[in-house]
Image (cartoon, coloured by chain):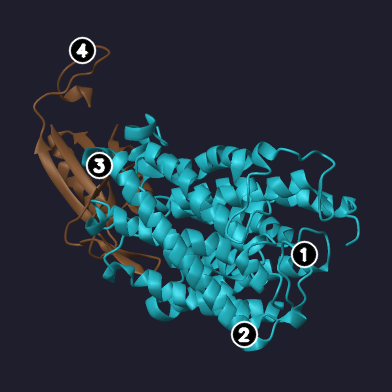
Chain colours: A brown, B cyan
Amino acid sequence: MKKIEAIIRPHMLDAVRKALGDRISGMSITEIKGFGRQRGHSEVYRGNEYRIDFVPKIRMDIICKDGDVDALIQILMDSARTGKVGDGKIFVYDVAQAVRVRTGERGADVI
Amino acid sequence: MNTPVLNSGDTAWMLISTALVIFMIPGLAMFYGGLTRSKNILGTMMHSFIAMGVILLQWVAFGYSLAFTDGGSWVGGFDAIFLRGIGPDSLHGSIPTFVFIAFQGAFACITPALISGAIAERVRFRSYVLFILLWSTFVYDPVCHWVWQNHGFLFKQGVIDFAGGIVVHLTSGISALIACLLLGRRADLDKGIIPHNVVFVVLGTGILWFGWFGFNAGSALASNGLASLALLNTFVGPAAGLCTWITLEKLILKKPSTLGAATGAIAGLATVTPAAGSVMPVEAMLLAALTTVVCYFFVSHKSRLNVDDSLDAFGVHGIAGILGPIGCGLFASYGYNSIFHHQSMSALNGTSQLLLQIKAVAVVAVYSAVVTAILVLALRKFTGFRVSREQEEQGLDLSLHGERAYN
């Protein structure tokens, strides 16, 4: 099992969800703030400029079977991409165990 | 003198105006509250709201008497303490004295609340309450007497301050500057502190503008042509301020901002206040636009000064409080001093009126600054004015009031 952690632009979320369709049976998202290459931006209040380092992003966590990773990454790249700096990043982790709370089942069948 | 007779039309308008001015206080609370960080919004709104509580009690107890009974040139007497001797049948001009007391009481409430913008996000509540009570007693009430009571020395000299450019905006704006200088900067200022809710600021501006029709047009103390002039000026002044501010933003920063529109409207409102009954709408527009230019450049360069006028109480109200009354001397064409509206414009002649306005602004500014400095230093010594570093970090809402705005 793998965990795909994708950081994407907030306004691309709907497109990504649609593109994933029923290739996944579940996911969770978190509203986060951070900076990468995009850095921040500046905002102006009453003529004074303020540097905003942390840009709002969405982090999505998807747990999938080992064999699905590459296909899902491709879908994420196709649907979350605008081509400008700040499209986000994808990280993949190994998952040691999965348990369904209701029944106590374990392993890849849970996801 | 004719025997005063109650006019029901005037009375009805003044009853409404009083309620309109009172509505400005929650408007100010929204305006200031939105400008602070989310951890301080309740503490900041409380600074305005508490004035509606304690200052109104002070006003009825002795504030009204100090401001509006005869007394001498400098301050009123104690004749009307606890409104002694005044009843429902007492008249002030063509309206009941009780209405006049309530209308002026609303002014007394909002004026010290304006100062809170300069010292936002860092003062102890207890000290703030003491400060506004003392400030009302030693600054607002006497200055109100000087300018608006017919024994006051500035009134006798013929100073024009229709609805409170000197009495309200100058006193509070200058005091705001002195208070924030003495109090010091907020700990996180260098990290950049930005408004947490501009929506509240715009809503607050709308409420203030709405209430200001009572503030200015009510200062005619009658339902007449003068009130109509003040009302129209209260329309065109902020309109000019709003357009001026966003035009400057568009030219200099490329993007006109909502916060800028709101700030320009407030600058226009504050500027037009002393002039509302003395200038024609076209001059009101010009005066508001010119003052807004000065406010814009002051506020947008304030980071170069070593002061933390957090919400621009001086940058907007103070500057408007200086330039508005002086502009009156330049532009006054239809002269009335609101409170006792029988001062004819024939008494005015160009330069001497301008010099008188400048003198009045200087005298009131120096007096407000000195008394505010004494009050702030005394409170700092005896009760402590600033919250602790930990409380400032945690936010006033939780550390001083035990609650949070957003749960």
Which is nearer the N-term, disc 2 or disc 1?
1
* Nearer to the camera, B289 or B330: B330
Residue B92: give x, y in percent of width and height.
79, 52
Judging by the rendered image, the residue that carries numbered circle 3 is B393
Q: Does residue A100 appear to the left or right of B202 in the view shown?
A: left
Q: Chain of mark 3?
A: B
The foreground one among B359 and B322 is B359
Which label sits in the foreground, 2 or 1?
A: 2
Residue plotted at (46% across, 46% down): B134
Under mark 1, the amino acid is Ala
Residue in the image at 75% along x and 39% along y: B85
What SS does tag 2 mark?
helix
Secondary structure type for disc 1: helix
Say whether mark 3 and mark 1 are on the same chain: yes
Q: Which residue is mark 1?
A: B227
Q: Is residue B27 visible?
A: no
